Amino acid sequence: MSSLLNNYARKKISFVRGKGCYLYASNGKKYLDFVQGIAVNSLGHCHDHLVKTINNQSKKLWHVSNAFTILEQERLAKRLTQNSFADYVAFQNSGAEATELAIKVARRFFYYKGNPKKNRILCLNNSFHGRTLATIFASNNKKSIEGFAPKVDGFDHFNFADHKGLEKAITSKTAAIMVETIMGEGGIKVIPDYCLKGLRKLCDKKNILLILDEVQCGIGRTGKFFAYEHAGITPDIVPIAKGIGGGFPIGACLMTKRVAACMGPGSHGSTFGGNPLATSVGNAVLDQVLKKGFLKNVQTIGNYFQEQLKNIQSEFPKVIKEVRGLGLLVGIRVGVDQTLFIKKLLDNKLLTIKAAENVVRLLPPLNVKKENIDQAIVILRKVCKTFK
Ligand SMILES: *Cc1c(COP(=O)(O)O)cnc(C)c1O
């Protein structure tokens, strides 16, 4: 009997070691890992540079309070701003904290501007922004909010692709629109570039802040450092987490100078956020992701992966209904039982993870080799055959 809270339907399998694309289980078997902690291990398991960095830093300094200047944190913030729309960064420990800070900043901005009633955030139905009280009610997905009343107020919602519904939902009280640039848990739903452009225009016209949640799709996952870059727009606030830590828990909220002015000393804090150990690892992740050619390679291999998946789709159109995603943020919508499909992949030593809309997510590390993609394709094709 496990003493763990039963809040996950955990699989029996457990892993004792990982290297790159591979996980080694306590049952002695080796698995191709296309979950990578849900887009967290951007460089795969136990990347040499990350191992060295964390070893070295662990002998120097782990944690000091944010009451002092933390050099590794300064450096990571500088690099994030130099490579994005942002001018300022606040470090957190998780995606939910990062999105919740984005919400706080948006509310505070209009308070600071003398318009405290402009404090509501407009979000997509069935999105995913985390599991804190505020973020579940921002996400507005039935399963996540069930039993957690009273509802946290301050969020309004519209449906994916419902342009008219979006315009209708905007009021004089709307402070920000918050969406995931690509919906992850929601089923790898890419918001088209023209919609993101339209969203930016709408926000400018109505004096509304644009928050793009890039916790899952940011830090190179789509082949650009940030997913919003594909649309050629700039947001006002961007929460990130997952990929920036490469497996170490880090979250951060990025914002423009204009917005940041509302957050003075004492307005927000985090005991652990941005400590020397975490931010040294974050810097080590950026050493790799920002290397010349790295992101280009994510695009190339991501395109190759999706082409191969589309080939399987045309061979088994009843099993694979649709290939979704951008770069290495990839999902396949299956026309068969999703749980069974994932189990069959697992039985063939390929680890994948579900998302909404019957989508199976395929999230290799960003430095995945072509041969590992080919290996996954062989397994996927084999499993599709069993459904014929
Ligand atoms: C995972 C995720 C979060 C929440 O991150 P946690 O670290 O689990 O709190 C928020 N937003 C998006 C888009 C995510 O994918």
Image (cartoon, grey):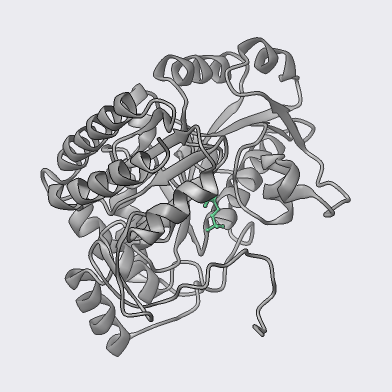
The residue located at (82%, 42%) in the rendering is 153
- Please tell me in which quadrant of the rendered image residue 331 appears: top left
Residue 313 sits above or below residue 102 on the image: above
Q: Is residue 12 visible?
A: yes
Coordinates of residue 197 in the picture (x, y in percent): 44, 17
> The N terminus appears in which quarter of the rendering?
bottom right
**Residue that extends furthest to the right in the rendered view of this protein:** 150
Identified at 75% across, 19% down, the residue is 171
Figure quadrant of residue 21: bottom left
Rendered location of residue 152, percent (x, y):
81, 47
Horizontal and vertical percent for residue 236?
49, 34
| 106 and 326: which is toward the camera | 326
Residue 202 in the figure: left or right of residue 153: left
Question: Does 374 sit above or below residue 325?
Answer: below
288 to the left or right of 129: left
Q: Is residue 336 above or below residue 317?
A: below
Judging depth in this view, the residue of 161 and 88 nearest the camera is 161
| Apparent side of residue 333 relative to residue 84 in the rendered image (left or right) | right
Q: Nearer the viewer, residue 155 or 24?
A: 24
Question: Residue at left 42%, top 53%?
Answer: 344
Q: Picture coordinates of residue 288 (x, y %)?
A: 19, 56
> Does the image show residue 241?
no
